[in-house]
């Protein structure tokens, strides 16, 4: 029996669609991963002819894009364009949904089988209510003839209260099983593979607890500024942009207990347990802003928005009781790198403790980007001498010469495919989103003016003092492992 599948992208001309979604669809088309009888409907307010829309898609694919730098094949583009259609209209105009329903009905009538649909919201949150109400009014959220799913981007809300309101709004029109809350970090191969490394092997997992771990560090740094995102970034800042979502997920994967089984329910349950047990220390948080930020495009000249943060937290559970967790992230820093470091305790009676570097700790590093891999830092003997040097046991994800090879799955590509297949394992649910916002609210409640720091540094000196007062130091991320050409701007 034949079937049809329709992906409706609200906001096809958005920055998000141009940078990620269109490229992911291209890659899926090239790999044969898109359903055979698929229709993609793009929406935006701008009026475009069919020819103009196709030109727009081609230009979006040809545009220089850090996240999509491989060859664009003409034949693949043509095959993708055959699936794509454009339907302009304002999302707060009920008349638009009459036209959308008519279009979708034509697609449904072309098949005698199921009529499956996904609505992807690549648009502003203030339009969500209009979209949901009008889709429901037209009967476009019903699942009588096939599945209906909703994909929605982070950040979901700007605090606990607003996130809860959005979740409540979605629950009015969709079941939780229909809602796919996107955080593209959950689609990253390196992040997902932490689960395999920890729970598919028995080598390190017995050591990941308070008996062996001294502390944990999580870093998400970028050596560039906000670019053209000033209008958006200045309303939320660094902590709400990446701390509430990306770094919460990184921490959850690195510290969660083993799920009973590999399923959405079991994995999500463990992620939620970690986030709910995370304790904020509002007195131990530093907010910074890079020098020159207030001169960026669409940024208020007196802006107090954070472009950097560092904080200390802890997990209130048996496994990691009293193990400190240090988290930092920011823009215009010395290096672009995202990683989780598990720093092990150093026994006081280590054999070579009197040698230089003899008391340096062993470290397990999950490098999310750019030189992706899972690495153990250890000490070894220098050849021909009784000296110690740093070395690495490493598993690297990019074994080919090109760092931009699209054979390495893109997070959007993976997550769109998961949504089509109905797998919610690597999507956040309502309880998870609200728990992470509740934690972040605990940090921002006593927020002060950000400390100005120099571009190219590691942020304010106060961030160093935050960890140094505990007798520890921030690790300087190393490029000595998985050393292949790095992403350049």
Image (cartoon, helix red, strand yellow):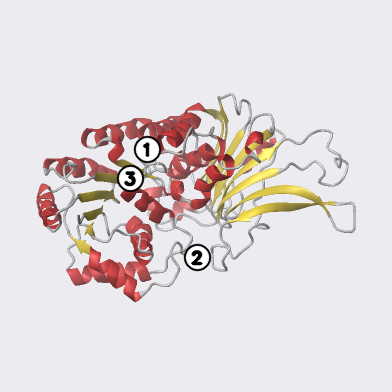
Q: Which of label 3 and label 2 is nearer to you?
A: 3
Q: Which of label 3 and label 1 is nearer to you?
A: 3
Q: Quadrant of the N terminus?
A: bottom left
Q: Is residue 300 among what the camera can see?
A: no
- Left or right of 273: which side holds 231? left
Label annotation for residue 238 = none
**At 33% across and 49% down in the image, what residue appears?**
421
Question: Looking at this view, is 175 or 462 the one in front?
Answer: 175
What x and y, as percent, mark residue 336? 56, 55
Residue receiving disc 1:
158
Query: Residue 61: which quarter of the image?
Result: bottom left
Residue receiving disc 2:
404
Question: Looking at this view, is 3 or 457 the one in front?
Answer: 3
Label annotation for residue 422 = 3
Mark 2, residues whose alpha carbon is within 10 Å: few (<14), some, or many (≥20)?
A: some
**At 34% across and 30% down in the image, what residue appears?**
161
What x and y, as percent, mark residue 185? 46, 48
- Left or right of 189: which side holds 168? left
Q: Are marks 3 and 2 in contact (CB under 8 Å)?
A: no
Q: Earlier in the sequence, mark 3 or mark 2?
A: 2
Query: Residue 483: which quarter of the image?
Result: bottom right
What x and y, as percent, mark residue 56? 27, 68
Q: Which of label 2 and label 1 is nearer to you?
A: 2
As drawn, which residue projects farthest toward the right? Answer: 385
Q: CA distance from mark 3 to mark 2?
A: 28 Å
- Left or right of 394: which side holds 42? left
Seen in the picture, residue 475 relative to 315 is either above or below; the reply is below
Q: Secondary structure at mark 2?
A: loop
Question: Looking at this view, is 326 or 114 the one in front?
Answer: 114
């Amino acid at each position: 029996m034949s079937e049809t599948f329709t992906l409706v992208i609200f906001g096809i001309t958005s920055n998000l669609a141009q940078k990620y979604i269109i490229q992911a669809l291209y890659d899926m088309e090239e790999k044969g991963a898109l359903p055979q009888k698929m229709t993609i409907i793009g929406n935006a307010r701008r009026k475009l002819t069919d020819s103009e829309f196709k030109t727009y898609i081609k230009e979006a694919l040809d545009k220089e894009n850090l996240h999509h730098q491989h060859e664009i094949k003409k034949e693949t583009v043509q095959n993708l364009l055959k699936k794509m259609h454009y339907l302009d209209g304002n999302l707060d105009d009920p008349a638009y949904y009459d036209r959308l329903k008519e279009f979708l009905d034509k697609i449904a009538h072309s098949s005698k089988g199921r009529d499956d649909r996904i609505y992807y919201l690549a648009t502003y949150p203030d339009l969500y209510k209009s979209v949901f109400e009008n889709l429901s009014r037209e009967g476009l959220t019903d699942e009588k003839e096939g599945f209906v799913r909703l994909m929605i981007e982070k950040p979901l809300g700007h605090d606990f209260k607003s996130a809860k309101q959005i979740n409540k709004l979605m629950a009015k029109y969709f079941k939780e099983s229909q809602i796919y809350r996107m955080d593209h970090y959950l689609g990253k191969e390196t992040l997902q593979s932490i689960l395999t490394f920890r729970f598919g092997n028995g080598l390190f997992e017995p050591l990941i607890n308070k008996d062996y771990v001294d502390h944990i560090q999580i870093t998400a740094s970028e050596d560039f500024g906000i670019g053209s995102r000033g209008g958006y970034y200045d309303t939320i800042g660094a902590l709400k942009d990446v701390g509430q979502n990306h770094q919460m997920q990184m921490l959850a994967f690195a510290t969660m207990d083993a799920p009973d089984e590999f399923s959405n329910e079991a994995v999500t349950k463990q992620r939620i347990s970690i986030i709910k047990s995370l304790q904020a220390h509002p007195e131990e948080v530093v907010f910074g802003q890079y020098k020159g930020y207030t001169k960026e495009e669409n940024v208020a000249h007196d802006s107090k928005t954070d472009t950097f943060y560092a904080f200390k937290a802890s997990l209130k559970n048996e496994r990691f009781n009293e193990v400190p967790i240090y988290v930092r992230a920011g823009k215009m820093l010395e290096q672009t790198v995202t990683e989780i470091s598990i720093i092990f305790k150093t026994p006081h009676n280590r054999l070579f403790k009197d040698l230089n570097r003899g008391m340096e700790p062993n470290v397990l590093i999950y490098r999310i980007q750019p030189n992706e891999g899972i690495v153990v830092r250890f000490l070894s003997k220098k050849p021909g001498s009784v000296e110690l040097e740093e070395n690495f046991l490493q598993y690297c994800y990019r074994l080919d010469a090109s760092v931009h090879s699209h054979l390495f799955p893109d997070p959007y590509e993976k997550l769109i495919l998961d949504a089509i297949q109905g797998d919610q394992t690597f999507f956040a649910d309502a309880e998870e989103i609200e728990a992470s916002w509740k934690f972040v609210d605990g940090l921002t409640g006593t927020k002060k003016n950000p400390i100005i720091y120099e571009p190219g540094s590691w942020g304010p000196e106060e961030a160093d003092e935050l960890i140094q007062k505990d007798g520890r130091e921030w690790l300087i991320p190393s490029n000595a492992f998985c050393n292949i050409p790095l992403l350049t701007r």
